[in-house]
Amino acid sequence: MLASDSPKLGSIRDFLTQPHLGGKIVFAIKAKKGTTELSYAKLTQDTVDDYRNQFTRLLDKMSERKPVPYGLSDFDSDTYQYLPSTQIPHARDFLGDPQVALQQLDHEFISAIKFTEFRFQNTKGDVIGVFKIYLKTGFLTSQNRFKFIFQDSVLTPFTKDIIIAPPRFDCILLEDVIYIFNRPNFEKIFDYKRVFQEKATEVFVYFAKPHGYTVEGLDEIEQKCMKSRSKMRRLAIIAQGRLYKSLTFDKVASFCKVKELNDPILDSRKKIMKFLTPEAFLRIFDEDYVRGELTGTEYISTRKTLFKTPGKKKSV
């Protein structure tokens, strides 16, 4: 998709303001085997209209945002990201049309909800999906479920304040394009943890082999990183750039000397690096700078921190 062809929020608004839209709410439940199971409840026409009006008002507030192709790094608040749905791994698990109507709305089911989708359809059969992860304190919780009437697979709220309470959305699917407004939640919905794991593994596989130097303690660092979504994300960014393959022992040694770092421990004679913490391993690649000196990796400045050295702190 060319930059000139980047999708506009007006397309979503145009769809939601069409007359005679029908709709239902789709619930995604994470099954025991790690798969995602979809079921749905029908919505009355009044409920459909109330929800789409709320979504449209929110889109109006976002009208000045600029489109940016999806990337692993964060994006600015005045933008939104987009991605062809064909590039989402295992997209069929999440985007299929559920055939199972919800039969009961009990506490066990509500607790297992991974995300919800408001799916609207026009008279031509075209569909738009509005995805949202709700906090445990909102929407269909054990406290709020009694604010809905659920009968014959139709979910109807008692009052409009229930409609107004959750108008926010994380991402929207329209014409095979995903519009992303909350990147972390988008990645949870579409299970990007698997993508991060694959990319992070690439980095560790590379450093497990000698490249003019040897990295010790790598297995323990890998185990700790694989338990953290944020660390896997950083490794996925590192893998995406592939500039980590340009690192040399002398570059790392010089960098650590300038920054007065004592992690990793360096053996210049045997060309061995020993990392004591996952943070030190990751720091070598992004260096907590807006642009990493060693690898050229770029980051958003508001997310950066100062170096902590034995002496004074050194600013970016």
Image (tube, helix red, strand yellow):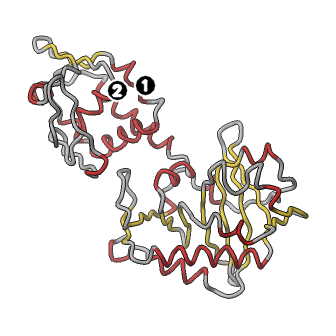
Image point (41%, 63%), residue name: 81
Proximity of marks 1 and 2: CB atoms separated by less than 8 Å? yes
**Which residue is labeled 1 in the image?**
224
Left or right: 169 in relation to 231: right
Amino acid under disc 1: Lys
- Please state which of residues 221 and 301 is positioned toward the viewer in this rendering: 301
* Residue at the image position 77 percent from the left and 51 percent from the top: 143
Residue at image mark 2: 278
Label 1 packing within 10 angstroms: few (<14), some (14-19), many (20+)? few
Q: Position of residue 302 (x, y in %)?
A: 29, 51
Using the rendered view, name the quadrant where residue 116 is placed.
Answer: bottom right
Q: Position of residue 55 (x, y in %)?
A: 59, 73
Q: Is residue 145 above or below residue 49?
A: above
At x 40% / y 41%, what residue is drawn?
A: 233
Q: Secondary structure at mark 2?
A: helix
For this orientation, the residue located farthest to the bottom is: 19
Whole-angstrom CA distance, mark 1 to mark 2, is 7 Å
- Quarter occupied by the N terminus: bottom left
159 left or right of 194 in image: right
Which x, y percent locates residue 296?
A: 18, 45
Residue 180 appears left or right of 157: left
